[in-house]
């Protein structure tokens, strides 16, 4: 067992894990942050997407030990002061989710897309950038709409911060 | 319609928990003392189990118990069942082989469960499972239907000689033969409907908890129909009597049919919890899901359609071989028969139809209903035939369809169904207009000028939803009735709980069901709670599949609301000293029509519970229940048109435009309905272009067992969709709803393939139409 410590959603946390423990399992099982999901075993569905040091990563593809000392944000940590993150609000507003299982990963990946591209996103770019996240329910139509709609709002919020 | 009533695109009440990571799925559940299970599965597609040696595994750290099929049999746990009896044409019942939750003597597909390992952690269980030493004696393997029927093929179950489960017929063979003898043209096709893996994004999971003090079991499971799970586990698998078994399906991450069935894992987890004395949780990994979730489709069909000289259809003959895999899953016999051949009349007047379906065992994963279940297969046959017929007869595809459309209702087809209503031409016209069908020729010329091949293809589908009238399905072999139940509880403060036997796993029931109440009583949807998915809370229900939650589930709610309304009006009339017939309910108030007398809804509710001043003889309280049994199926129908461009150098197909024009009857929430169509279209386009499940024919290994090998549609594989609705209200239920959950997946595959074959000028193309296949078809044409 190894001891790991990291910042998760703004709080310093630590725990004992096996060397082989994946970050996603540390988040879900040790910290009870079950919003981050596991949808595959080959790093292809994106249900486990979180932010590590400000970048979207697949938490099923990283060992908890590798996350030592990093700053992690999960789906539970993006709403501030009880207010939804613009991307969360856009997913609701545009019906970008059905069963909700892919949704946390989709939202975390989408925030990262906007972080990298800013508000001048077009449909093709969003579709291309979402390649690492699978949704079986929505046909992506409304997810794409949500990301495009949120792009402007997210930039505004960041400018204000 | 109010802003939250019927017909409003109300944003979903349930979204908040999902977008904030607070959804509660089965694998999120933790109970004190919970341990973890991993299944030991067969690596062979067909083998005898000679010996199971667990000694090394049992010595591993954290291991609590390792259990096998022999112990399961000792404890009297029953076989998995198929719940729909189908008879062969000679009158004999289907030849069903035994399916043990843990295989005891023989394994019949790769992934067949052999033992369960329970340990402190999942990793420990997995380590130990790797060390369970199962000695197998390999047997010959068969994966395809033709090979399975061949003389001398490996025999999979002793009960099914030559692997034939049933040889079933529907329709009038003589009348059909007569029709063909009068034909001016006959169109013939061989059509394969590719096997698919449902791939709900939440993998299946089960948590079984046995309480020894109460001799009671609780099962959390990823189910579309927890009550059916409880019924079957009690009545057939002898897990526990119903009063000793609670089944909870919490948030469920998509189903698409694959979570209807009761699988070995939940039974074994419950049983193992008693055997080991600890709560047992199992969570499927994706490869395991590919191996063990019931697959869909997998039909091989020969069809012939007879036309007269004027291009009217005279008759249809269909012969289908359906691959049911290694065991008969819960609805596997109904899917390729009563959900398939009964829709072979499509949207058309066809005087005579004869269908023959052979269901066949193979050494592959069991096959059962997947989004659409039988109806996509029927639609694919019909709409590939119609398009091909138009090409062969030299008429335009829409004209051939128009000429043969059913135009008067009710319409009795030769294959059981009575279509109640519809307007097929309206959807065809709407779709043609939306895609600018008339302008296609110039768009094609433009593509050609760039060296590309453009094609357009359509599909006019009809399906049977609102499953289903109980007596009718009973007479056809169903083991259960397919009604739905609802209970409406008005609390003393006027807030409302709706308990429903429908189950939401993405469909948005928490919103749409509340909209019914908002419409009826004018109370806000925030004062309405939808309770579902727990057998301790909801008395009974048949669950969600076959687009039944609207047409059947909501109808039950309407019936219960009728009773609540009647009692509420009686109370209000009494309190306001008015005539019951003069009470109207509006905006959360009960009013005496034509006066200014009003009583707020909550005061009426409070009066019902204080019971200080009720009409004489009236029981206190305000809670009503209802069961609703539909009188017919419902028949959503529509027209889908797809326009593609094929790159002749690479064979790659790009979907340029896809339009859907659907008649779902009345719609409660257009936003949610459109979402259902989007998702269905993605699955249908996925089938047509990307998804295909492959077994190695020699070894029976599933080659496409991960997202590396099985191509899931991703955002950049799909276009945005153009959707419209044409409405003929369903006369068969109080809300006029037909259902929308499966249409997209049913109607889209033939539209895509018709478009590609139009582009490349050849008919010989099978799904999935990969660039390689399209390129080969184009260059061999
Ligand atoms: S669970 Fe991480 S990519 Fe699928
Ligand atoms: S909403 Fe169900 S998988 Fe995306």
Image (cartoon, coloured by chain):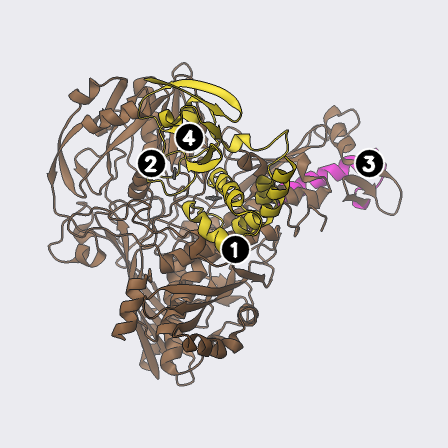
Chain colours: A yellow, B brown
- Disc 3 to disc 4: CB gap under 8 Å: no
Which residue is nearer to you in this view: B422 or B4? Answer: B4
Q: Chain of mark 4?
A: B
Nearer the viewer's eye, disc 3 or disc 1?
A: 1
User: Taking the image as four quarters, which one is ligand 1 found in?
Assistant: top left
Q: Are the residues tagged 3 and 1 within 8 Å (C-beta)?
A: no
Q: Do marks 3 and 4 both belong to one polypeptide chain?
A: yes
Circle 1 is placed at which residue position? A123
**Horizontal and vertical percent position of residue A106:** 48, 42
Who's the residue at 32% across and 19% down the image? B120
Task: Give the label on residue B599, or none.
Answer: 3
Q: Is residue B426 left or right of residue B107?
A: right
Q: Are marks 2 and 3 on the same chain?
A: yes
Helix, strand or loop at label 2? It is loop
Label 1: element kind:
helix
Disc 4 to disc 2, how far (Cα)? 11 Å
Q: Nearer the viewer, residue B373 or B18?
A: B18
> Residue at the location (64% across, 50% down)?
B9
Magenta highlight range: B557-582
Q: Earlier in the sequence, mark 3 or mark 4?
A: 4
Residue B116, placed above or below residue B198: above
Circle 3 Cα neighbour tier, 10 Å, few/some/many (<14 / 14–19 / ≥20)? some
Judging by the rendered image, the residue that carries numbered circle 4 is B27
Residue B563 in the magenta stretch? The answer is: yes
Disc 4 and disc 2 in contact, CB within 8 angstroms:
no
Subunit of label 3? B
The label shown at residue B285 is: 2
Q: Is residue B284 left or right of residue B729?
A: left
Chain letter of disc 1 in the image: A
| 2 and 3 marks in contact (CB < 8 Å) | no
């Amino acid at each position: 067992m190894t001891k790991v410590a990291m910042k998760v959603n703004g709080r310093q946390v630590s725990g004992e894990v096996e060397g082989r423990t994946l970050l996603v399992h540390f988040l879900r099982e040790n910290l009870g942050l079950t919003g981050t999901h596991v949808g595959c075993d080959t790093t292809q569905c994106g249900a486990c997407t979180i932010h590590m040091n400000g970048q979207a990563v697949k938490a099923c593809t990283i060992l908890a030990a590798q996350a030592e000392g990093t700053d992690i944000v999960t789906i539970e940590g993006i709403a501030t002061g009880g207010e939804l993150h613009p991307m969360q609000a856009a997913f609701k507003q545009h019906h970008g989710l059905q069963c909700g299982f892919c949704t946390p990963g989709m939202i975390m990946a989408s925030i990262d897309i906007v972080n990298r591209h800013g508000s001048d996103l077009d449909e093709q770019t969003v579709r291309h950038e979402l390649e690492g996240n699978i949704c079986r329910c929505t046909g992506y139509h409304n997810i794409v709409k949500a990301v495009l709609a949120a792009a402007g709002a997210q930039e505004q919020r960041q400018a204000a911060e | 319609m109010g802003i939250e009533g019927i017909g409003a695109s109300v944003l979903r009440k349930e979204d908040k928990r999902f977008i904030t990571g607070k959804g509660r799925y089965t694998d999120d559940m933790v109970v004190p003392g919970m341990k973890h299970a991993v299944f030991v599965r067969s690596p062979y597609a067909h083998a005898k189990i000679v010996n199971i040696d667990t000694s090394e595994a049992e010595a591993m750290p954290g291991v609590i118990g390792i259990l096998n099929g022999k112990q399961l049999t000792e404890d009297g746990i029953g076989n998995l069942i198929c719940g729909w009896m189908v008879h062969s044409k000679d009158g004999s019942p289907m030849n069903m082989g035994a399916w043990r939750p843990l295989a005891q003597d023989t394994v019949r597909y790769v992934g067949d469960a052999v033992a369960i390992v329970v340990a402190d952690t999942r990793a420990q269980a997995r380590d130990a499972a790797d060390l369970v030493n199962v000695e197998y004696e390999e047997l010959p393997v068969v994966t395809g239907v033709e090979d399975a029927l061949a003389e001398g093929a490996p025999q999979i179950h002793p009960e099914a000689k030559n692997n034939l489960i049933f040889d079933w017929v529907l329709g009038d063979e003589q009348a059909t033969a007569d029709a063909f003898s009068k034909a001016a043209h006959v169109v013939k096709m061989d059509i394969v409907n590719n096997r698919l893996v449902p791939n709900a994004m939440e993998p299946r999971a089960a948590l079984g908890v046995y309480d020894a003090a109460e001799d009671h079991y609780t099962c959390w499971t990823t189910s579309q129909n927890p009550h059916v799970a409880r019924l079957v586990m009690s009545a057939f698998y002898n897990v526990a009597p119903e009063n000793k078994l609670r089944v909870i399906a919490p948030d469920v991450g998509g189903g698409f049919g694959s979570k209807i069935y009761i699988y070995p894992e939940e039974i074994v987890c419950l049983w193992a919890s008693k055997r080991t004395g600890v709560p047992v949780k199992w969570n499927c990994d994706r490869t395991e899901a590919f191996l063990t979730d019931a697959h869909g489709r997998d039909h091989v069909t020969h069809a012939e359609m007879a036309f007269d000289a004027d291009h009217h259809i005279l008759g249809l003959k269909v012969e289908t071989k359906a691959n049911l895999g290694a065991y008969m899953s819960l609805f596997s016999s109904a899917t390729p028969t009563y959900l398939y051949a009964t829709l072979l009349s499509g949207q058309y007047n066809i005087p005579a139809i004869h269908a023959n379906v052979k269901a066949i065992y193979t050494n592959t994963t069991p096959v059962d209903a997947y989004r659409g279940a039988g109806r996509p297969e029927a639609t694919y046959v019909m709409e590939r035939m119609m398009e091909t017929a138009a090409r062969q007869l030299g008429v335009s595809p829409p004209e051939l369809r128009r000429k043969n459309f059913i135009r008067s209702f009710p319409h009795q087809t030769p294959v059981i169904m009575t279509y109640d209503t519809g307007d097929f031409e309206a959807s065809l016209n709407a779709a043609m207009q939306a895609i600018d069908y008339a302008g296609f020729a110039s768009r094609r010329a433009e593509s050609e000028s760039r060296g590309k091949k453009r094609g357009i293809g359509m599909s006019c589908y009809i399906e049977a939803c609102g499953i289903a009238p109980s007596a009718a399905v009973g007479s056809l072999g169903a083991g259960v009735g397919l009604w739905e139940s609802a209970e409406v509880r008005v609390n003393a403060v006027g807030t409302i709980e709706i308990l429903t036997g429908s189950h939401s796993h993405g469909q948005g029931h928490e919103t749409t069901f509340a909209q019914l109440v908002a419409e009826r009583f004018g109370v806000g949807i925030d004062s309405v709670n939808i309770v579902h998915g727990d057998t301790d809370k909801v008395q009974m229900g048949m669950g969600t599949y076959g687009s039944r939650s609207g047409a059947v589930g909501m109808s039950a709610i309407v019936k219960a609301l009728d009773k609540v309304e009647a009692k509420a009006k009686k109370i209000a009339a009494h309190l306001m000293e008015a005539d019951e017939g003069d009470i109207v309910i509006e905006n959360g108030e009960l009013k005496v029509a034509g006066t200014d007398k009003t009583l707020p809804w909550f005061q009426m509710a409070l009066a019902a519970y204080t019971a200080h001043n009720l009409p004489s003889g009236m029981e206190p309280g305000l809670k009503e229940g209802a069961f609703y049994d539909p009188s017919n199926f419902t028949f959503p129908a529509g027209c889908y048109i797809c326009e593609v461009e094929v790159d002749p150098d690479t064979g790659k197909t790009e979907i340029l435009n896809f339009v859907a024009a659907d008649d779902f009857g009345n719609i409660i929430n257009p936003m949610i309905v459109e979402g259902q169509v989007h998702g269905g279209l993605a699955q249908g386009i996925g089938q047509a272009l990307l998804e295909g499940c492959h077994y190695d024919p020699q070894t029976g290994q599933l080659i496409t067992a991960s997202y590396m090998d099985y191509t899931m549609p991703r955002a950049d594989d799909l276009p945005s969709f153009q959707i419209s609705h044409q409405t003929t209200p369903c006369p068969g239920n109080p809300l006029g709803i037909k259902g929308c959950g499966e249409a997209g997946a049913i109607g889209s595959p033939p539209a895509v393939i018709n478009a590609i074959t139009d582009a490349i000028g050849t008919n010989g193309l099978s799904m999935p139409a990969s660039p390689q296949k399209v390129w080969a078809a184009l260059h061999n044409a």
